[in-house]
């Protein structure tokens, strides 16, 4: 009975991983910065998509641990494909149907299936 339950759980988990996200990296006037990440969990964040793309060798990024009072820990996205956001700069994440600035960051935003960010 345990083996059957375990098999059923594994099937259910892998069955739900069908979300596809496209990550667009500047410059936007070419296909060079278009990265498609497939087989993500339905609740995958932009960071999850970026981590998978990095593991597949499609892009690189660096996160930095920052101190925010009242939070046990927080990370900031500092570098994408070797381009670093310097002092008083940051990476603005765009998404949604009209590619507008998102109110959440890469660690919180869960894109819809086939969404570009």
Image (cartoon, rainbow, N blue to C red):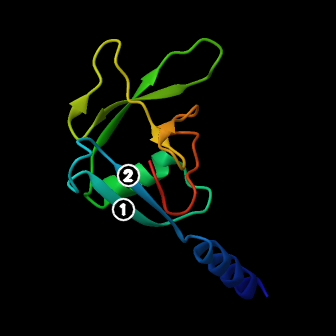
Name the spot of residue 14 as percent of width and height, x first.
58, 75
Cβ–Cβ under 8 Å for marks 1 and 2: yes
Q: In the figure, residue 108 lies in which quadrant?
A: top right
For label 2, count other residues whose C-alpha is less than 10 Å away and answer few (under 14), some (14-19) or many (20+): some
Q: Which residue occupies the foreground of this view, 112 or 44? A: 112
**In the rendered view, would you say 55 is above or below 84?**
below
The quarter of the displayed image where residue 11 is located: bottom right
In this view, which residue lies farthest toward the front?
98
Q: Residue at 36% of width from left, 62% of height from top?
A: 36
- Up/down of 5 relative to 57, above or below: below
Q: Mark 2 points at which residue?
A: 23
Point out which mark residue 60 bears: none
Q: Is residue 74 above or below residue 106?
A: above
- Horizontal side of 115 relative to 16 (left or right) equals left
Could you tell me if residue 51 is visible in this image? Answer: no
Q: Which of 75 and 46 is in front in this view?
A: 46
Residue 36, labelled with which disc? Answer: 1
Residue drawn 46% across the image and 39% down it: 94
As rendered, which of 64 and 38 lies closer to the eye? 38
- Which quadrant of the figure has residue 91? top left
Nearer-N-terminus badge (1/2): 2
Answer whether residue 5 is visible to the viewer in this image: yes
Residue at 25% across, 51% down:
33
Q: Nearer the viewer, residue 46 or 103?
A: 103
C-alpha gap between disc 1 and disc 2:
6 Å
Q: How crowded is mark 1: few (under 14 residues within 10 Å), some or many (20 or more)?
A: some
Relative to residue 90, is residue 48 drawn left or right?
right
**Which element carries disc 2, helix, strand or loop?**
strand
Q: What element carries label 1?
A: strand
> How many numbered circles are shown?
2
Residue pushed farthest right?
A: 1
């Amino acid at each position: 009975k345990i083996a059957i339950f375990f098999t059923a759980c594994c099937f259910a988990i892998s069955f739900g991983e069908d979300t596809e996200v496209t990550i667009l990296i500047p410059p936007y006037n070419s296909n060079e910065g278009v990265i498609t990440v497939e087989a993500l969990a339905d609740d995958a964040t932009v960071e999850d998509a970026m981590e998978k793309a990095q593991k597949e060798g499609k892009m690189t990024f660096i996160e930095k641990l920052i101190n925010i009072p009242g939070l046990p820990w927080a990370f900031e996205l500092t570098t994408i494909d070797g381009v670093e956001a310097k002092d008083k700069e940051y990476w603005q994440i765009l998404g949604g149907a009209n590619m507008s600035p998102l109110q959440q960051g890469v660690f919180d935003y869960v894109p819809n299936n086939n969404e570009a960010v």
